[in-house]
């Protein structure tokens, strides 16, 4: 439903020529990608500093001239291989990252980074990357030749521009039947503009519902986490607290203080997610302090999938939402016992449109809240897999975000990335384990 609404808006804008207000593009963290996107706004070819040693100026001018004559936008960036660090060490994601940093401007994007030449296109989809690999194989390692071959092949695949408006003579026009095409197109434009307005109003309403429900949830969470932090000190060893216990508890207090400052300024769903992330940092720091004080193993990073306010999980277990496939999920000890006994876990329930359901059944209305609580413990792919098969999972599989099934990121298959360092529980990044469900 949500994707069809976006498609209706896009169709209306294309046919009627109406430009809606631009949506804010997701920020892709990375100076190299941001600089490349800024350069592509003035020149369809961007050479990172030092790239002139790889592609001489004369060849670069030739490539730039070819790009300007292309029938549809083609953008090419020559970057150091280190740029792949900004996309999780996956060069295959560089074209999508460049597209997002360039404000989602339609066109074909290609990135030459070291020995990697990858591409994606809003016009050609995955075909663009196949053309990039073919051009690289045929050029024998010559970078300029690779790019020029790629441009030639893309131009052959791109839709041809429409012929001139009309070559009819005055006599031909005099013999025309005089059907009122202008009137017909005017009516069509009005209808489509109305459809675009309806779809946009529906989207605004859904965003407000998400802000309202997720905002109420996170404010309740703030009160609960505050009580947990304030009543925990008695269980932390008093004056004989271990140094690491004191450090963890100090982080919990600092996170709570930061959350109390942020709650007054909530006006957008991104701010709801940010507040939930801050609360999760405070929750995890407190869980680590309690575990150290009681000489227990440190908890795993993500909160309990059934309610982030539950005690910190010590393990993952198999669980399947109604009608969905089983997957590994983090569970608190009490819910683990319930699952083993075949009982229903104590899920966080919300009231959405006068119906009380587990939060993952509320879909978009709980998306900002869930992104904040579970987005720290899982990357984009794992977060989707955690809730796959539920309305919340469908809401998280957003075509405006870079995921394997998204048009933005579905241009290429991701390449293997370097595994993170997991030597220390205090400095380990969010959990990188599989959730048992593939995209």
Image (cartoon, rainbow, N blue to C red):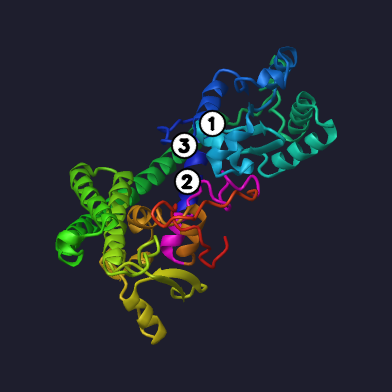
Residue 408 part of the magenta-drawn span:
yes
Secondary structure under the numbered disc 1 in the rendered image = helix
Q: Earlier in the sequence, mark 3 or mark 2?
A: 2
The label shown at residue 165 is none
Residue 160 part of the magenta-drawn span:
no
**Residue ID for mark 1:** 33
| Labels 3 & 2 near each other (Cβ < 8 A) | no
Is residue 202 visible in the rendered structure shown here?
A: yes
**Place of residue 309 in the rendered image (x, y in percent of width and height, measured from the top left):** 27, 65
Quarter that holds the C terminus: bottom right
CA distance for labels 3 and 2: 26 Å
Q: Main secondary structure of the magenta part?
A: loop
- Image point 55% across, 35% down: which residue? 99
The crowd level at tag 3 (other Cα within 10 Å; few <14, some 14-19, many 20+) is few
- Image point 63% across, 20% down: which residue? 50
**Place of residue 420 in the rendered image (x, y in percent of width and height, measured from the top left):** 53, 51
Of 199 and 383, nearer the camera is: 383
- In the rendered structure, the answer to whether residue 31 lies left or right of residue 309 reads right
The crowd level at tag 2 (other Cα within 10 Å; few <14, some 14-19, many 20+) is some
**Residue ID for mark 3:** 29
Q: Residue furthest top?
A: 58
**Residue ID for mark 2:** 6
Of 274 and 149, nearer the camera is: 274
**Place of residue 32 in the rendered image (x, y in percent of width and height, measured from the top left):** 53, 29
- Image point 30% across, 66% down: which residue? 291
| Labels 2 & 1 near each other (Cβ < 8 A) | no
Secondary structure under the numbered disc 2 in the rendered image = helix
Question: What span is in magenta?
Answer: 390-413
Displayed quadrant of residue 115: top right
Q: Nearer the viewer, mark 2 or mark 1?
A: 1
- In the rendered structure, the answer to whether residue 243 lies left or right of residue 38 reads left
**Place of residue 242 in the rendered image (x, y in percent of width and height, measured from the top left):** 25, 59
């Amino acid at each position: 439903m949500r994707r069809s609404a976006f498609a209706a808006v896009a169709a209306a804008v294309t046919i009627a020529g109406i430009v809606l207000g631009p949506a804010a593009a997701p920020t892709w963290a990375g100076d190299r990608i941001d600089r490349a996107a800024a350069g592509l706004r003035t020149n369809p070819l961007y050479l990172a500093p030092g790239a002139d040693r790889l592609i001489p100026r004369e060849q670069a001018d030739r490539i730039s001239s070819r790009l300007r004559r292309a029938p549809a936008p083609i953008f090419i960036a020559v970057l150091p291989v280190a740029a792949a660090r900004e996309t999780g060490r996956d060069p295959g994601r560089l074209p999508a990252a460049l597209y997002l940093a360039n404000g989602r401007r339609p066109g074909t994007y290609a990135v030459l980074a070291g020995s990697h030449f990858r591409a994606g296109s809003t016009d050609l989809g995955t075909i663009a990357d196949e053309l990039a690999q073919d051009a690289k194989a045929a050029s024998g390692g010559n970078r300029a030749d690779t790019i020029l071959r790629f441009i030639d092949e893309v131009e052959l695949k791109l839709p041809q521009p429409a012929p001139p408006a009309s070559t009819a003579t005055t006599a031909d026009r005099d013999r025309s039947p005089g059907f009122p095409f202008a009137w017909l197109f005017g009516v069509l434009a009005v209808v489509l503009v109305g459809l675009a307005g309806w779809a946009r109003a529906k989207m605004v309403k859904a965003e407000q519902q998400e802000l309202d429900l997720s905002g109420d949830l996170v404010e309740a969470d703030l009160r609960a986490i505050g009580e947990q932090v304030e009543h925990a000190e008695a269980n932390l060893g008093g004056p004989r607290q271990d140094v690491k216990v004191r450090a963890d508890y100090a982080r919990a207090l600092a996170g709570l203080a930061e959350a109390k400052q942020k709650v007054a300024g909530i006006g957008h769903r991104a701010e709801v997610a940010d507040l939930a992330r801050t609360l999760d940092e405070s929750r995890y720091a407190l869980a680590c302090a309690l575990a150290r004080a009681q000489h227990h193993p440190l908890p795993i990073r993500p909160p309990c999938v059934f309610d982030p306010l539950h005690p910190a999980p010590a393990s993952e277990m198999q669980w399947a939402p109604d009608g969905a496939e089983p997957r590994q999920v983090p569970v608190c000890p009490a819910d683990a016992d319930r699952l083993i006994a075949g009982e229903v876990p104590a899920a966080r329930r919300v009231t959405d449109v006068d119906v009380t359901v587990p939060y993952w059944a509320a879909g978009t209305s709980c998306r900002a809240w869930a992104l904040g609580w579970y987005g720290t413990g899982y990357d984009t792919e794992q977060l989707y897999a955690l809730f796959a098969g539920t309305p919340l999972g469908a809401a998280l599989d957003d075509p405006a975000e870079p995921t394997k099934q998204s048009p933005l990121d579905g241009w290429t298959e991701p390449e293997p990335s370097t595994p993170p360092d997991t030597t220390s529980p205090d400095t380990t990044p969010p959990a990188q384990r599989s959730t048992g469900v593939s995209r």
